[in-house]
Image: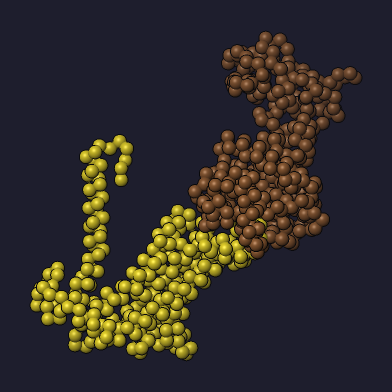
Chain colours: A yellow, B brown
Amino acid sequence: MITVGQSKARRLALHAGHTAGLAVFMVFAMFPLFWLVKISLTPNNLLYSEGITLWPSSITWDNYQFALLGSRFPRFFLNSVVVSLSSAAIVTLVAAAGGYAFSRFRFAGKVPIMFVMLLTQMVPLVMLIAPIFKIMSPLGLTNSLTGLIIVYTAFNVPFATFLMQSFFDGIPRELEDAAMIDGCTRLTALRRVIFPLTLPGMGATLGFVFTAAWSELLFALMLINSDDKMTFPVGMLTFVTKFSVDFGQMMAAGVLALIPACIFFAFIQRYLIQGLTAGAVKG
Amino acid sequence: MAEVTVRDVYKAYGAVRVLRGVSIDMHDGEFVVLVGPSGCGKSTLLRMIAGLEEINSGDILIGDRVVNDVAPKDRDIAMVFQSYALYPHMTVASNMGFSLEIRRKATDLITAAVGRAAGTLGLGDLLARFPRELSGGQRQRVAMGRAIVRQPQVFLFDEPLSNLDAKLRVQMRTEIKALHQDMGTTAIYVTHDQVEAMTMADRIVVMNEGVIQQIGHPLEVYDRPANQFVASFIGSPGMNFLEGTARQTADTSWVEMVDGTKLPAPRTDAEEGQTVIYGVRPEALTIDEEARSGLIARVDVTEPTGLSTLVFSRVADSITCAFTMDRLDLTRGQPIGLVPDVARVHLFDQASGVRL
């Protein structure tokens, strides 16, 4: 950052410090990912024999081959995609509708409803495991992807609604007024004017819920018990057996699981950054 | 084109009464300006005419149709907002053509209408741009274009020039007035700027605290204000007010100030001995540099503008402003005489503020 009135040396020092600080943070944040990739490429026989090195003396793609072809990982992966995408889509739609109502309408019970929604965010999820199992079990929603989608949707809707509300708050009401005078009904105004402007907010919400559902372990572990319904975080545990942990294969599966998340974020990144900043400034 | 009638309209938000029995008849093709300080209810009234705000009681008619329960889209009105309210994700052309597109008009018809409006407003080169790529004045023009493209029955303007700089505001003021004269569509214009109101209106509606204070031609409102509020609000610099006691004999009347000075007053209904407010506009005061006549005051500040000079002087505890086209050489503290033109003096009842 350049500030008027500072000497050149001081500016350089500041710049260097700034860059160094960022570099340290990047190493700190990225090192576990690097280690994940490194282990996934290390042959099993070198895993313990080489000691701790930054890169193995030879690499192998066997772990990936096994994860993709020899294990049930593709099934776990697909389940995760279904659960995460569905949860993200449903939450975003519900939160958008709710956020819009909170932002634009005055109605009886608005404040109590918002308070209750806030209250739900204060309860640690662990405490809800037993009651949720009790509720889901007689409904036939345990060991079912639908059950997981319902749970993830329920947990994420309150926060996502507040997020969406802040995006709607950032869009001037006059735009809707103008659209309604121009000939729109409230719904058409919403679809033609407000919705396109809320895309960044929806992107942020989608991304947030997708990641949360994609990496959720606790409820998936508790509600799912058959192999063909497992999501990948639970599936990863199948690499841990009674007698050994197959680190190479587990890491290969982990790297593969990162890919859709990366693609998803690359896809919504433009909206996400716009959305987060817009939310920060205007919300 | 249509007349707009507001009949005994009330509006309250909870305990706050925003409009208390407002009635106005706006004629076909008229340019009516609603003016008043912030919170006087003028914008609320405009939004009610637009259908963006509900009415607690009373009627609003556009033409001869009661529109109380008609949706904004079916009222055949167009509105220009203070913030312009341009759709950020649409080009200028799409913004202007949106109302026709929503009404499913043919594309070539929309293009022609947008082209015509753009030509009128000098926006021809900007049609492919987005609002964020335009200056404030250009955005204002697009907002106008969006309103005129549809040829509505009534134009509503909600402080459309407030966000522009002073020079552009004067320019746009002239353009809006010229546009109205060309189109002849009924226009209702809300502003808190009394200069805008004076210069643009066919009739001014002065509002305060949800009540209409006076409706009339701008010069009529200026020359014969209904009460002290109107007198103080309309005119820049504002009218001078001095407290005194009404005195009259069979053939002359005057007001006696606290210091004993006698100022000539017009013949009014004021009773002998009644406490009144003596109101005189700055341009109705002649300055006697020798301080031999009129109300004696001491010069506080002079403000030469080149065209004219404003002289602020102190009378007892209050500051009085006088306007002169002469270039006077006055020094601070110098005594001067302020001689009012009795034909342009107003007396107001001290308690009610009503002009006597």
- Is residue B227 left or right of A60 when viewed as pictured? right
**Count of picture labels:** 0
Q: Quadrant of residue A216?
A: bottom left
- Is residue B332 left or right of A275 when viewed as pictured? right
Q: Position of residue B164 (x, y in %)?
A: 57, 40
B148 up-or-down from A233: above or below: above
Residue A117 in sight in this render: no
Name which residue lies at 84% across and 21% down: B253
Q: Nearer the viewer, residue B231 or B222?
A: B222
Name which residue lies at 70% across and 52% down: B151
Q: Position of residue A79 (x, y in %)?
A: 38, 82
Q: Quadrant of residue B169?
A: top right
Q: Nearer the viewer, residue B287 or A194?
A: A194
- Is residue B5 left or right of A29 when viewed as pictured? right
B346 up-or-down from A143: above or below: above
- Is residue A129 left or right of B135 when viewed as pictured? left
Name which residue lies at 77% across and 37% down: B217
Residue A40 in sight in this render: yes
In the rendered view of the protein, which quadrant contains the N terminus of chain A?
A: top left
Q: Position of residue A21 (x, y in %)?
A: 24, 53
Q: Residue furthest right?
A: B250
Q: Quadrant of residue B174?
A: top right
Name which residue lies at 73% across and 51% down: B154
